[in-house]
Image: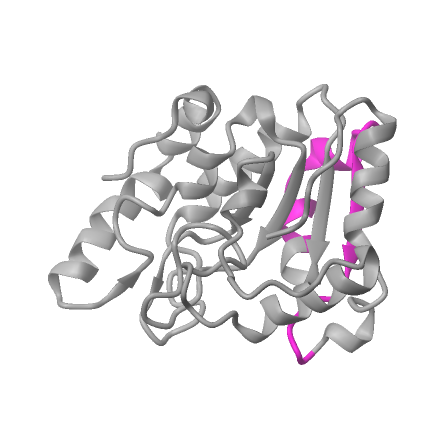
Amino acid sequence: MSETIPESWRPVLEPALATPEARKLGGWLKAEEAAGKQVYPPRGTRLAALALTPLDQVRCVILGQDPYHGPGQAHGLAFSVQDGVRPPPSLVNIYKELEADLGLPRAVTGDLTKWAKQGVLLLNNTLTVEAGLAGSHAGRGWDAITDAAVAAVAESASPTVFILWGSHAKKKASRVPTLGRASHHLVLASAHPSPLSAHNGFFGSRPFSQANAFLEAHGRGTIDWRV
């Protein structure tokens, strides 16, 4: 794989990278791009979530499915878009809940880098996608890598918040047995912020205030959720 594994994550991800599934991934991505297919996000940004949030600094994990598939949107962080790009509907709903939960005004930018730098791991299950085709790279090898990353956080002794939005995030968490047994973590599960499901339990779930109350109670400070 052409992406450089950030130093703090290397020990836990190297075994995953050695699996047949992961070894095939790099060659498959190169072949897709050689065939003229547009892959998002661009090379060098696909592991941005891990690069911006070192393993020993993770305080909260927010799990996404795969990158946005529109031009100029994805930049390696789940639910985030590059500055200057209009926030997609799911992110707009996240901002609505943030306003209702903490009274914070809705941000103009969709870039969530500030969260990542405070220890919020914004990790998609699949880290690439073909332009215009949501879910097109699912099952191609990223799962082995991102499952290992989630498991590494779950195995940490540091109390951490796991925010699971929608069935896909819940299924991913279920593949990490240590998370289910780790009573020192807080798992917050609700509907996905997509307009198709946000009114089924996402709105009113108050994940941001709950996360901060837990982190503060366990001596890990609070996250400034302003964007």
At 25% from the left and 49% from the top, the residue drawn is: 43
At 43% from the left and 32% from the top, the residue drawn is: 16
Q: Is residue 33 above or below residue 125?
A: below
Can residue 183 be seen here? no
- Percent of width and height locating residue 158: 72, 22
Relative placement, left or right, of 22 versus 53 is left
Q: Quadrant of residue 85?
A: bottom left
Q: Does the magenta stretch include residue 180?
A: yes
Can residue 119 be seen here? yes
Q: Quadrant of the N terminus?
A: top left
Relative placement, left or right, of 171 versus 114 is right
- Percent of width and height locating residue 49: 47, 42
Magenta part of the protein: which range? 170-196
Task: Using the image as rendered, state which of residue 124 and residue 138 is in the foreground.
Answer: 124
Q: Is residue 6 above or below residue 108?
A: above
At 78% from the left and 66% from the top, the residue drawn is: 202
Task: Using the image as rendered, state which of residue 202 and residue 72 is in the foreground.
Answer: 72
- Percent of width and height locating residue 148: 52, 34
At 73% from the left and 73% from the top, the residue drawn is: 198
Relative placement, left or right, of 204 versus 126 is right
Q: Does the magenta stretch include residue 182?
A: yes
- Percent of width and height locating residue 181: 80, 31
Task: Using the image as rendered, state which of residue 85 and residue 139 is in the foreground.
Answer: 85
